[in-house]
Image (spheres, rainbow, N blue to C red):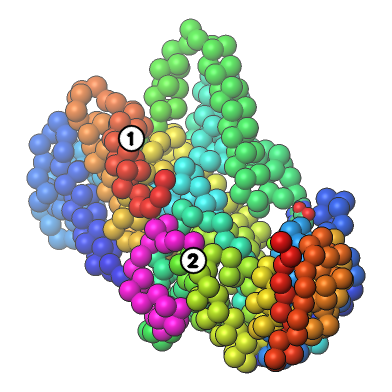
Amino acid sequence: MSARLDAAGVGWDVAGARILASVAFAAAPGETVGLLGPNGSGKSSLLRLLGGLARPSAGQVSLDSVALSALPRRALARRIAVVTQQTATDVEMTALEVVLLGRIPYRPRLAGVAATDLSMARRALASAGLDGFADRRWSTLSGGERQRVDLARAFVQEPDLLLLDEPTNHLDIRHQLDLLRTLAASPTTVVVTLHDLNLAADWCDRLVLLCGGRVVAAGTPAAVLTAERILEVYDVPVDIDAGPDGRPRIRYRR
Amino acid sequence: MNRPVLPVAAGLLLVSVAAAVTVGSADLSIGDVLRAVGTHLGLPVRPLPPLADSIVWDLRLPRVLLAALVGAGLAVCGAVLQALTRNPLADPYLLGVSAGASTGAVAVLVLGIGGGISLATGAFLGSALAFGAVLLLAGRRAAEPTRIVLAGVAVSQLFSALTSLIVISDAASRDTRSVTFWLLGSLTAASWPAVALCAVVAGAGLVLCWAAATALDAFAFGTDVARSLGFSAARTRLVLFALTALVAATLAAASGAIGFVGLTVPHAVRFLTGAGHRVLLPASALAGAIFLIWADTAARTVFAPQELPVGVLTALLGVPVFAVVMRRRSGTP
Ligand SMILES: Nc1ncnc2c1ncn2[C@@H]1O[C@H](COP(=O)(O)OP(=O)(O)O)[C@@H](O)[C@H]1O
Ligand SMILES: [Mg+2]
């Protein structure tokens, strides 16, 4: 149901450029870890390495102490689901067909969609608030609807580790909160990149703050989100109060 | 969903084969066709007169069957390449195959290269050479669709230029007309050996592509999603690129480069079957076969006794079909 994730000294070079350097952090089973950082700080790149979509140039990512590179892709697909930032628009599949993709790792290679897969996919669509969207073509969905279909695809993959790249960026506030509540309550280990610092502070167990491909801070929201650090990393002056639950509340100065 | 499409299309294909054989200058009925086939299969039926029997068995049947196989193979190759490259304009000749086939064919026919090998063999070798050049040019990251597609465009241009050069160098030759005919795609060279070869290669190609149907579905959103669903994206792409190149090269060797079937048929079939490749691939094969049977029947009868290269006809028919498909393609522009 949930896995422990370890990144140890992870580095990634592309075409001679160092994108990530000595990134180290861990996510305990069931934790929801928020990945923060300015544009270009390496969040998406790190998420791809954590999901085994690319190989690190240095260091190692492991799942329950087994290196990702030692696991076959198909075995990995049953344990890790990834939702990358989606750019495809001209896909001819229906919403239901897209969600069903998430069941592929569980199917014998030559088998078709099973009835259980179908009912699971329909339930996932319903819990994403997309009842009645099953037969809608992907190309006709709005950005937020696509994002929720993609999340449903990741959920039916029944992962031990769920990696989400800016899953809230097209969602209205209600669906953002629905998603974060679901993630926080789910037994699955989650690593999610977010831009909204307050949402991250409210819903994540721990945060990892990246800047220039390095980890600047990691720990509880209160430990990571200090006014000095936000000024240093984002160049934005803020005031921070501790909320009643001990989580930081960030106000941006005008 | 839409499962009935397959049995209906399979029935239509059988009817098309039998009916298309009856069409032509000599009047034959479907009963005659069945009698001739029965005779050759050793069934206890009354044989046709020798001339009619020869028209069915030696001329029309192999030609109709070759049309079916070429149509089926081209449509499947097109569907697979459209999925792998996520490019709706992909067709079986994307990776240099048809340009290479042309060069190989004219090299044999006009220059006499190869020491007496057949035109088909020359075409096949030309295709193989062109696909090899595409892989070489695309380099280590040949599995990236944009790279291999660009390499395909470049190599196709190069081989087309070579073909023109060879043809022009020998413009006075009596071969020019047959070269032109062949370049445009034609099934006049149909024979039982060609049918057998194409049946084996296109059949195996279809089965192997169908075995990869789920992987093709997973490529709808590109490399990262395919990987996260458990597929080795680079290996899957390279294997299927090579497989479609082999099938397209075999078909081009038998019939020249027949255009628009591989491009148009998969798009049209998607309307009926949806995007899932487990149904799309066999349905495209059946639709491609039926389409090319009738296109070729028209090509050999409309201006009889003159023949049109069937490639001219598929283009004439394919463009309006393509226009309709493009207009009805759902969603935002
Ligand atoms: N394949 C690549 N080739 C070259 N540069 C890349 C590649 N992928 C990412 N980068 C660069 O790495 C940096 C981090 O990118 P990314 O991980 O997408 O950042 P974030 O998601 O935090 O905005 C950026 O400067 C980006 O331009
Ligand atoms: Mg990013």
Task: Inspect the image, locate mark 1, and give the three-letter code of the amino acid beneath it.
Answer: Val
Q: Quadrant of the C terminus of chain A?
A: bottom right
Q: Secondary structure at mark 2?
A: helix
Q: Is residue B275 visible?
A: no
Q: Quadrant of the N terminus of chain A?
A: bottom right
Q: Quadrant of ligand 1?
A: bottom right
Residue B321, position in %: x, y? 29, 40
Q: Is residue A59 above or below residue B175?
A: below
Residue B312 in the figure: left or right of residue A216: left
Number of labelled discs?
A: 2
Q: Identify the residue at image location x=55%, y=75%.
A: A176
Can you identify the residue that label 1 sits on? B319
Can you identify the residue that label 2 sits on? A144
Residue B94, position in %: x, y? 53, 41
Q: Identify the residue at image location x=40%, y=50%.
A: B332
Residue A53 in the figure: left or right of residue B169: right
Q: Identify the residue at image location x=45%, y=67%.
A: A145
Q: Is residue A250 visible?
A: yes
Residue A155 in the figure: left or right of residue A241: left
Considering depth in this image, is A157 or A176 the residue closer to the camera?
A176
Q: Secondary structure at mark 1?
A: helix
Residue A209, position in %: x, y? 80, 72
Q: Is residue A219 above or below residue B259?
A: below
**Badge 1 density bin: few <14, some 14–19, many ≥20, Cα 10 Å:** few
The answer to if B154 sits in the magenta stretch is no
The part of the image, by quadrant, that contains residue A122 is: bottom left
Residues under labels 2 and 1: Cα distance?
36 Å
Q: Identify the residue at image location x=33%, y=58%.
A: B283
The part of the image, by quadrant, that contains residue B183 is: top left
**What residue span does the magenta drawing correspond to?**
A121-143
Residue A235 in the figure: left or right of residue B183: right
